[in-house]
Amino acid sequence: MQLKYTLLAGAVIGAPASAADLKLSIEIPTLAMAEYHRPYVAVWIESNDQKFVDNLNVWYDVKKRDNAGAKWLKDMRTWWRKTGRDLNLPVDGVSAATRAPGEHQFSFSSSTGALAKLAPGSYQLVVEAAREAGGREVLRVPFTWPVKTAQSAQARGENELGKVTVNLQP
Amino acid sequence: MNNHTRFRLVATLAGALALLPLAAHAARNWLLPSSTNVAGNNAWVTVDAAGSDDLFHFDHNAVALDGLRVYAPDGTAVEAKNQTTSKFRNTFDVQLDKPGTWRITILNDSVNANFRVGSESKRARGTMESVRKEIPADATEVSVSRNDTRMDVFVTSGKPTDTVLKPTGSGLELVAYTHPTDLVAGEKASFGFVFDGKPAAGIAVTVIRGGNRYRDQLGEIKVVTGKDGRFSVTWPEAGMYWLNANYPAREAGEEAGPAPGGRGPGAGQNAGGPGGGPNAGGGRRQQEGGTLDAPARRSSYTATLEVMTP
């Protein structure tokens, strides 16, 4: 099930290193509490002046009947305002199921999806997490496109996100 | 308190009592939606209608739903559902079954007339049509005033749209240059006021963030519309905000309701201002001098706006 959604998202776990892939690691922290729900997470690219460029991934409760899980997409407020409210989820290649606490690895190919269309320039990869009955957190990690030299950058969340790492190899 | 001040207060109070039955109470009237931005394809909002000093705590008066109108994103009027009345608040639901921006309005528009028939003083109250019928042709000293109050909230399902934002051209209305469901703390929002569709200059606008029960200071933002009727607000923080303005233009700091600032140093400033006398007199003329064809006008506008965190 998880693999299916991962493939839908255009990301391949454990794929061999290939030219100019964007490797992303997102850590969802383990939170000890009576009522825990997996966070909704949106991953997108924006310019350095925070203008939306393209979506990479949106994790939400895709299993609820009648797409009822879409109700809480607005809680990713930054993403919702920039792009979410313009979309009609689920979107093939973007939406995926929520994930359990732990580190999740993704690889986005430069030859398909958002990266294939990305113009040369400096960008931010943005990760926003919002948890039902919990909090919200937004992290930004800078990167330059296309990849000419190896890049690695990370940000660390304090509440809803752990370490977010972006690795790019030419 | 000098005579000048007293005269102004009396004039203002008389005007408020005669023409603004809602504002004559201590309370601020408001609509409070459960959400202003919703997602998904089966969205509902519940709205409270109440009047209170503490925004947005329903602890004083319910606001009547007689003038309730709900407009879908395409501008068509739809029914509010599950209307209930209770002591301190009235509530209703709106099923947001179409994507876009919805407008929920309580509009009251009434006409008052004082006149004499022979030696007898008479009053009429109702719509312009009903009042016109009540006043006989031989009536003298006919004095007519029209008072409208509009309360708006805007709720967006999915992407904001503009159709329901267009002013209707009657009374005091907000013009939204910034979309009223796309407000974010730290950002500047641009609005304007029109009266009967024309830019309303010099209108004092009061903006108060909810939750004043838990603050020592009201912390209201006061702005005055420019010649083009426009004004802007930079939201200091996220929350639900009450926005209120009244026509005709008054001096800044003078609220229709009890202005907490009015007892401070600002009160003296109002009384001593060069416009104090003529303005107060103008209020009386407005109140007493209207005709059936050109009634004196008073108009009040209130919106509840939600400001999100960035």
Image (cartoon, helix red, strand yellow):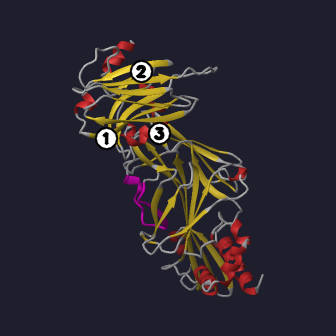
Asked whether residue B258 is in view, the answer is: no
B282 on left or right of A48: right
Q: Nearer the viewer, mark 3 or mark 1?
A: 1
* Distance Cα–Cα, label 1 vs label 2: 29 Å
Q: Have a look at marks 3 and 2 and say if they share a chain.
A: yes
Q: Position of residue B279 (x, y in %)?
A: 60, 83
Q: Residue furthest right?
A: B1
Q: Earlier in the sequence, mark 1 or mark 2?
A: 2
B80 on left or right of B1: left
The residue beneath circle 3 is: A77
The residue beneath circle 2 is: A97
Residue B176 lies within the magenta run = yes
Residue B94 lies within the magenta run = no
* Distance Cα–Cα, label 3 vs label 1: 24 Å
Magenta-tinted stretch: B162-178
Q: Position of residue A102 (x, y in %)?
A: 49, 18
Are circles 3 and 1 on residues that touch, CB within 8 Å?
no
Considering the image in quadrants, where does the N terminus of chain B appear? Answer: bottom right
Chain letter for mark 3, please: A
| Dot 3 amino acid type | Arg
Q: Which mark is residue B197?
A: none
